[in-house]
Amino acid sequence: MNDSARAVEFRNVSYRLDDGHALIHGLNLEVLRGETLVLLGRSGSGKTTTLKLINHLLRASEGEVRVDGRSTREWNVIRLRRMIGYVIQEVGLFPHFTVERNIGLVPQIEQWPSDRIRQRVQELLQLVGLDKELASRYPRELSGGQRQRVGVARALAADPPILLMDEPFGALDPITRAELQREFLALQRRLQKTVVFVTHDLREALLFGTRIALMEAGHLVTVGAPDEFVNSTEPLVTAYVDAFGTDFNYNKKRGRS
Amino acid sequence: MNVWQFMAQNHTEVLELTLEHLWLVGASTVLAVLIGIPLGIAITRWPSLNKPVLGSANIIQTIPSLALFGFLLPAPWIGARADRLAILALTLYALLPLIRNTYTGIKGVDPAVVEAGRGMGMTDRQLLWQVELPLALAVIVAGVRVATVLSVGLATIAAAIGAGGLGEYIFRGLAMVNNQLILAGAIPAAALAISADVGLGWLEKRLSPH
Ligand SMILES: Nc1ncnc2c1ncn2[C@@H]1O[C@H](COP(=O)(O)OP(=O)(O)OP(=O)(O)O)[C@@H](O)[C@H]1O
Ligand SMILES: [Mg+2]
């Protein structure tokens, strides 16, 4: 496969803390252009760390991470990050900016003209299903679900070709979560971006993933398409799948429904 | 004659000394802000500077004020005029609260917010001006408030080296064992300290991140 088909590639990447303790061990993984790769794994398995290696918030201790065929070490880090939308796990909206300024931040630092930014913000509010009137509110005046939508809109603002989403629908009630998932699914079909999507929820992984990568204790256990994944005989995968129990609209061939 | 009558009778002198006092405090606070805030920012960027900078500011604070005035006396240009000397000493004293509050204010910004900014491709400068400083502003103003109140009090001692200010009355009163005279200096000084405290406290509250 040539470089142009790969949006992101991990080549034997390890990430160590200063004390030498490794959080990621020898990771080899590629994300194809236009696919949604789900990083699945329990809490502490290294999903967020893996994402941060992509936009160079963390620097690989060994090996290299390549984005668009070029090592993140060679990229101008500011340019790299501006072409990668990032929805962080803690949402992290700027508390002193209105919703409008939050969403319009990357266009603003990219020096778009202000009327174009305003128009883009309106578009995005609609895209993520938020009322236009929320534009002038501050994050503290929003519900948790509305904040997460703003976080997604902010990441999409400058139309980046790559999107990193770290549990974007975490900490929501099941109904709102399902609603956001449905909307995002529609959005993803429309936008066709390369997405790296982090979750610990198998259902969410099966819903969005072109391929699913399971992580455990800083290692990549396996990566494959959703039906391959649920039918895998790899013990860590079956344990993960079994923990979720029932039917996923995939014919699970190991007997249980 | 009580203290109020004394102040009424000598109101031009009281006003003059108050203005001198304000000049000492105002000039030194402005200088301390101009030096202390950049230093506070610098030590968030270069952690190895943290210890030496905060350490020096700390040591300055422990020098008794009269001794500090004395140490600075031989300095060229500065030592030539008492008010310059007093302003320099007061500036040095005001540095610690400013450096410390700038540093803790910036370090206290929610790491998720800083990480979001960095992850979106903000440069260090954009992060500082658009995110960290605005969110740290209330804590920085709290430092200005502490520094100002502190130097209103310290500035009374500047009269001992002839720099003027409300300390004149206090020292004169001490020499003459005249309580009214002491109060004529202490009351306006206390009023200045309280108004600085209330005014900057109000500002601090208004700037508190939502
Ligand atoms: N700066 C750090 N210092 C020490 N340990 C860290 C640091 N960052 C992460 N870790 C550890 O590395 C491991 C992986 O962390 P990471 O945040 O990548 O997990 P995660 O898979 O995203 O988990 P979660 O689903 O809970 O968000 C965890 O055990 C975590 O405690
Ligand atoms: Mg995480």
Image (cartoon, helix red, strand yellow):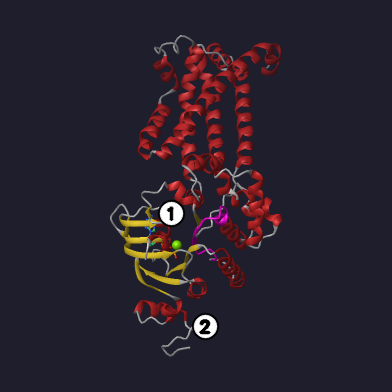
- Residue drawn at x 40%, y 49% is A75
Let me know if residue A160 appears in the view. Answer: yes
Q: Amino acid at mark 2?
A: Asn
Label 2: chain?
A
Whether residue B42 is situated above or below residue A45 in the rendered picture:
above
Residue B84 rendering spot, x and y as whole percentages = 49, 15
Whether residue A246 is situated above or below residue B158 in the rendered picture:
below
Using the numbered discs, state the Cα–Cα distance from disc 2 to disc 1 in whole angstroms.
Answer: 34 Å
Q: Amino acid at mark 1?
A: Asn
Residue B35 rendering spot, x and y as whole percentages = 47, 27
- Residue drawn at x 33%, y 64% is A27
Which one is earlier in the sequence, the residue at label 2 or at label 1?
1
- Residue drawn at x 47%, y 75% is A202
Tag shown at residue A80: none
Asked if badges 2 and 1 are on one and the same chain, I answer yes
SS at mark 2 in the image? loop
Front residue of this view, candidates A20 and B177: A20
According to the image, label 2 marks what residue?
A: A249
Q: Which residues are magenta?
A: A154-169
According to the image, label 1 marks what residue?
A: A55
Front residue of this view, candidates A123 and A233: A123
Residue B49 rendering spot, x and y as whole percentages = 37, 35
Residue A119 rendering spot, x and y as whole percentages = 67, 51
Q: Is mark 2 within 8 Å of ligand 1?
A: no
Left or right: B206 in relation to B45: right
- Quadrant containing ligand 2: bottom left
